[in-house]
Image (cartoon, helix red, strand yellow):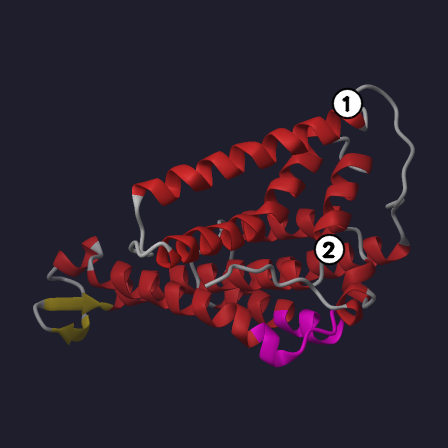
């Protein structure tokens, strides 16, 4: 099985959210994450999830089916986290609390249910924010914004981008190594020799990448920009709208 990146389409990149600076969207995601730590209620993250998914579908032009495909596995993981926290909550051992449901040997109290549901809702909100961010942001433009607007070191930023883009290449090389072993009559499943060969290929790729970056004088001084990333009124509008949603969500939760 070959691992491939799911890149945003041209429609998504030219949408309202697609034209917003990636640094603005990253800042909004971090602020929403920080805001969710201020409440344990279920309604604030539910409101943020609904607003984020609506923004992704309307302002980001992300098809609902693609949104669903991206968030469904993360939502299942969130529900599992919430269920496990409700079952093993310390409040379940308090006989003074009302029991909401009995699951085998577990007596789950209402405070445990509320805590588990609140945690699951926060994880779902965080996952939704991440999916919408990934579906409306080009990885190359994100690195350009980090370098130009956040003043991140060029070697680190573009090196991380190259490493991210090398993941599908390594997956293809792993498939080729396993097929080569089958042709030679050997087992094509996981074997230490396959991992050693993959490590050698990764080191060679990293060496070529380092030489290419040095040849282009990364980190040696000021550089011209092929893709300019700047601030626009869309950044202010989306940032203000996100702030309003966060304030309303926290007000509903009583934070």
The residue sitting at 66% across, 41% down in the picture is 162
Residue projecting furthest to the front = 184
- 44 or 8: which is nearer to us? 8
Q: Is residue 218 visible?
A: no
Residue 229 lies left or right of residue 243; in this view the side is: right
The residue sitting at 51% across, 50% down in the picture is 173
Look at the image and tell me in which quarter the N terminus lies.
bottom left
- 111 or 173: which is nearer to us? 173
Of marks 1 and 2, which one's residue comes earlier in the chain? Answer: 2
Expressed as whole percent of the image width and height from the top left, the position of residue 131 reads: 59, 62
- 201 or 57: which is nearer to us? 201
Real-space Cα separation, disc 1 to disc 2, in angstroms:
23 Å
Q: Over which residues does the magenta segment extend? A: 53-67
Q: Secondary structure at mark 2?
A: loop
- Disc 2: which residue: 138
Task: Tell me: residue 144, above or below residue 21.
Answer: above
The residue sitting at 33% across, 60% down in the picture is 81
Q: Secondary structure at mark 1?
A: loop
Residue 44 lies left or right of residue 83; in this view the side is: right
- Disc 1: which residue: 219
| Residue 211, quarter of picture | top right
């Amino acid at each position: 099985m070959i691992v491939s990146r799911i890149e945003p389409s041209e429609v998504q990149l030219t949408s309202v959210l697609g034209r917003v600076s990636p640094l603005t969207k990253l800042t909004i995601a971090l602020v929403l994450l920080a805001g969710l730590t201020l409440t344990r209620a279920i309604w604030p993250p539910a409101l943020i999830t609904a607003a984020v998914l609506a923004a992704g579908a309307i302002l980001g032009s992300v098809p609902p089916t693609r949104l669903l495909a991206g968030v469904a596995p993360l939502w299942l993981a969130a529900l599992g986290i919430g269920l496990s926290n409700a079952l093993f909550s310390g409040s379940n051992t308090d006989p003074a609390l009302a029991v909401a449901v009995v699951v085998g040997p577990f007596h789950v109290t209402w405070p445990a249910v509320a805590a588990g549901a609140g945690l699951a809702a926060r994880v779902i909100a965080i996952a939704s924010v991440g999916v919408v961010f990934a579906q409306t942001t080009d990885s190359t433009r994100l690195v350009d914004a980090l370098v130009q607007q956040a003043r991140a070191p060029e070697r680190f930023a573009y090196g991380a981008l190259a490493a991210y883009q090398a993941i599908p290449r390594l997956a293809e090389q792993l498939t080729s190594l396993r097929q080569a072993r089958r042709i030679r009559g050997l087992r094509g499943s996981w074997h230490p020799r396959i991992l050693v060969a993959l490590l050698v290929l990764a080191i060679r790729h990293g060496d070529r990448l380092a030489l290419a970056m040095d040849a282009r004088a990364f980190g040696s001084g000021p550089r011209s920009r092929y893709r300019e990333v700047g601030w626009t009124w869309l950044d202010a509008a989306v940032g203000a709208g996100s702030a309003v949603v966060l304030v309303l969500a926290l007000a509903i939760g009583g934070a």
